[in-house]
Amino acid sequence: MAELTGKSIIGFQSGGEGDPTIFGINPATGESLQPGYAAVSEAELNRAVEFAAEAFEVFSKTSGTAKATFLRKIADNIEAIGDDLAQLAPQETGLPEGRIRMETGRTCGQLRLFATVAEEGSWVGARIDHADPDRAPVPKPDVRSMERPLGSVAVFCASNFPLAFSVAGGDTASAFAAGCPVVVKAHHSHPGTAELVGQAVSAAVRDCGLPEGTFSLVYGPGRETGSALVRHPAIKAAGFTGSRAGGQALMKLAADRPEPIPFYAEMSSINPVFILPGAMAERAEQLAAGLHGSMTLGVGQFCTNPGVTILDSTADIEPFVAKLAELVGGSPGATMLNPGISAAYDSGAGALGGNVAVETVALGQAVDGQCQAGAALFRTTADAFLGDESLGAELFGPSTLVVTHDGADKMLALAKSLEGQLTATVHGTDADLEANRELLDVLETKVGRVVVNGFPTGVEVCHAMVHGGPFPATSDGRSTSVGTGAIHRFTRPVCYQGFPDALLPAELREANPLGIRRLIDGEPIF
């Protein structure tokens, strides 16, 4: 395994020279892992951000081809340490080796996807309106515009995805593709994994001849270090995946700065699943098996975990509930990511099961040991759900709450009552879906992704994917953190009026030297 230093990576330098205070913990055993990591000092954090600001002057003007080479080099470097990651990450997270290898592949895949976007170049949305000096009564000037990178970006690693939503995950990949240097805040749940990936990114910066401050990785307490990053005047945007409380606290800091910045937080979602009568009659057992697999995948520690399942009690739902209860009751316990997440799940499941309006239908098999979680199936009514907002709170773990209603009107009331979500799922026959178009219309206003006859866990990394949604699923429902549209979180439009052709960015020059798609005088030109 590559050597772990226990140090932050500040450009090409090391940081965090004090006593180690941050240790990975094996959640299955409670064992403290080595090495420990020292928190960066205020001066070290300032240096990382100042390096990034200096690097922006060069990196922001780096060609799409050069950025693509850089992104592919990062992917190559991560693949080269795949065995090391498969050995270390399970110790820090409790996730199985197979999941880590899958996530490594996804991480490298999205880096290469953004490389293709950077290389092709049309993402800048170049628009050209030619001058018309003879227009009366006022001549028309030559006006051209395109997206340009915002500046240095702070990225917060997620606890539940040590690779795909962490050091070299989607936020970092999209920021790099846009031309923004990145300062990453490591997560205490997987500090060693973060350093291994950080070393891979730093080596790519060197190998590609990019400025020193293009990438830094810092360790420190979440509140102090994270807050300092968001407040730093040289940080121009931030990406975060984590709790609602943590996300909202950082949102406020970003908004209250003398210069407010965009803060993209993924925070909370219960991802409702609606099962319509025709689908229930047609494939109840199949639906129960699919839902069980989705709710227990990764011990339920997915942002898209189906936390609420909505059933029409005028149909025969009991075979479905019985099968789901059987599957939940037979589910073995499994290790959660860290003691904090485990304690929150135990507390939340206990509170839900103790609610007088909620029936505990089935519990998974109990397992002794650290951070162990069992699956749970709860049941309540539509009226209870509508009357108690606590029933709609996210329970991060392997559980779902079945909510029964007595027809379309009550189902629509449930849909309309939902907060913003990442996903909503509808299972139905063609006839079901045709008869419930209003439900689909309502859900479109509530979520970032509507799934028909599937399950929400598993986010395809592709151009069209949207992983976002109205608040509180995210801080800005106009954006996505997965899919190539994510690049636009870290850009802003700039207009060039009356520029000599030679001084324009290559994307806007008359000859189109990059050969990208452009909108010219209102007509798309390829």
Image (tube, helix red, strand yellow):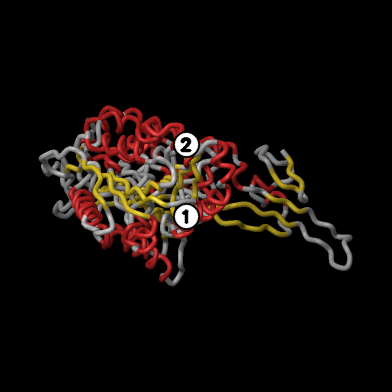
Instruction: Say what secondary structure mark 2 lies in.
Output: helix
CB of mark 2 within 8 Å of CB of mark 1?
no
Left or right: 214 as drawn, with respect to 395: right
Q: How crowded is mark 1: few (under 14 residues within 10 Å), some or many (20 or more)?
A: many
**177 or 386: nearer the eye?**
386
Q: Name the residue under label 2.
A: 279
The residue nearer to you, when weighing 318 against 430, is 318
Give neighbour class at mark 2: few <14, some 14-19, many 20+ (Cα, 10 Å): many
Q: In which quarter of the image is the C terminus?
A: top right
Task: Find residue 238 and report its image quarter.
Answer: bottom left
The residue tagged 1 is: 415
Up the image or down, 433 lies above or below 183; here it is above
Q: Which secondary structure lies at badge 1?
A: helix
Name the residue located 60 percent from the left edge and 47 percent from the top edge.
Answer: 124
How many angstroms separate mark 2 from mark 1 (CA)?
A: 18 Å
* Residue 488 picture location, percent across and down: 53, 50
Q: At 39% from the left edge and 39% from the top edge, which residue is drawn?
A: 457
Report if residue 204 is visible in the image: yes
Residue 38 seen in the current view = no
Q: In this view, does 128 lie above or below 331?
A: below
Identify residue type, mark 2. Answer: Ala
| Identity, as a three-letter code, of the amino acid under mark 1 | Ala
Rendered position, 221 above or below 374? below
Q: In the shown orientation, is residue 325 left or right of residue 73?
A: left
Foreground tag (2 vs 1): 2
Q: Position of residue 131 (x, y in %)?
A: 80, 56
Which quarter of the picture shows residue 163? top left
**Side of 294 relative to 6 (left or right):** right
Percent of width and height locating residue 436: 55, 47
Q: Which mark, residue 459?
A: none
Location of residue 387 in the rendering, given as x and y in whole percent from the top left corner: 36, 64
Identify the mark nearer the N-term, 2 or 1.
2
